[in-house]
Image (tube, grey):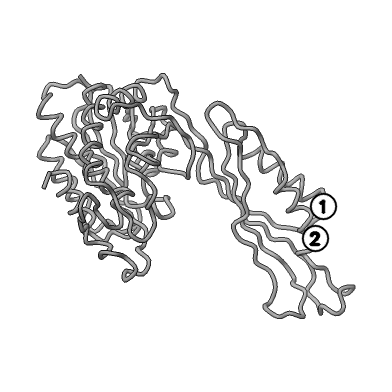
Amino acid sequence: MSETITLAQQLIQIDSITPEDKGCQHMIADYLSALGFNTEHMRFADVDNIWSRKGLDSPCLVFAGHTDVVPTGPADAWTHPPFSAHIDGDIMYGRGTADMKSSIACFMVATKRFVKDHPDHKGSIAYLITSDEEGPAINGTVKVVEALERRNEKFEYCLVGEPSSSHKLADSIKNGRRGSLSGKLTVKGIQGHIAYPELADNPIHNLAPALEQLVQVQWDHGNEYFPPTSFQVSNINGGTGATNVIPGDVEVLFNFRFSTEHSPESLQESVHAILDHHKLEYDLQWNLSGLPFITPADGELIQAVQQASENVLGYKPQLSTGGGTSDGRFIAPTGAQVIELGPINATIHKIDEQVSVADLEKLTDIYYQTLVNLLT
């Protein structure tokens, strides 16, 4: 069994359901300490984080990731126990195999190999690992980045090990992400008997035309980096549960995944204008969980990763900004170039999450070659 696979299994066998780390980060820190890294354990509230760095010179490449995983769902629905890291042929099963403990194992072995082969390499290598990526993401990467910014500790490149691949390893890398803006809308009416609608005011009926307009709006057409901005309703709740009562209010949860064609402020203004046009009595609470970011295709990091993939696999990854948010949204505002490259994402958060063992060996080689391309 290779060191990459052994390390991946050791990490996956720890049931670190968010925001728990349960010792994963101490294991990583001990491994890196033997390679000459200095590790700071940064705990904020109930969240464990580490910042581990070897060297102080520029440029610095940061490997970023998370040790927390989502809940398993019913364990008896899994082919193999979700924290067994069982290998069947070429497939390793377990929560965190793809998202994203295996990537961390690949980081570690690639770094060990690189430091051994290039002891006098230029620049620095660092790790930013959190246990609060799958949860609220309040006390994780964002807090570590804020601490580094306060002391003016900079880095130029960041490679996030999120599962970016779609159909085969490294067919896609994320060089940006859309912004995420959520709203909690409460439209108010007057509760009453359904047989006497003239004595009530049905908020669902009042909301319907405005909601239809919001759904039909073409917010933008995207641009060369991003698909068009998307508006989606995730929940609608109203009523008392009785069939003969007009509700007094209705609550709608919705989300924008938005491109750089919009700002949070412009989207908020547009939504309020539509609601006001329909003369609704409402309350609207906003939550911005991330701004859109982009790493230029001609940047050194993308060039290094694409060349590494071509050397290992024989092809260059396509660039993409699709999918959900990641902790890259907290790192990009520092000015660092940020990309995401990891395993195939088809089974993440699902029963029987899995990863190809052969892919992990190749991913280790890609990370190693990226270090060579940037720091030698």
Proximity of marks 2 and 1: CB atoms separated by less than 8 Å: yes
Label drawn at residue 278: 1
Q: Residue at x 44, y 27 (%)?
A: 295
The residue singled out by tag 2 in the image is 206
Give the x, y percent position of residue 52. Answer: 22, 39
Q: Residue at x 36, y 25 (%)?
A: 302
Asked if residue 44 lies left or right of residue 292, the reply is: left
Asked if residue 310 lies left or right of residue 54, the reply is: right
- For label 2, the SS is helix
Q: Mark 2 is on which residue type?
A: Asn
Q: Residues within 10 Å of mark 1 (few under 14, many from 20)?
A: some
- For label 1, the SS is loop
Q: Mark 1 is on which residue type?
A: His
Give the x, y percent position of residue 163. Answer: 36, 43
The residue closer to the viewer here, 101 or 63, is 101
Give the x, y percent position of residue 371. Answer: 23, 27
Vertical relation: 84 (above or below) 3:
below
Q: Give the quadrant of residue 344.
A: top left
Q: Residue at x 86, y 74 (%)?
A: 197
Vertical relation: 136 (above or below) 315:
below
Say how many tags the image has.
Answer: 2
Q: Give the quadrant of residue 2.
A: top left
Q: Residue at x 22, y 49 (%)?
A: 90
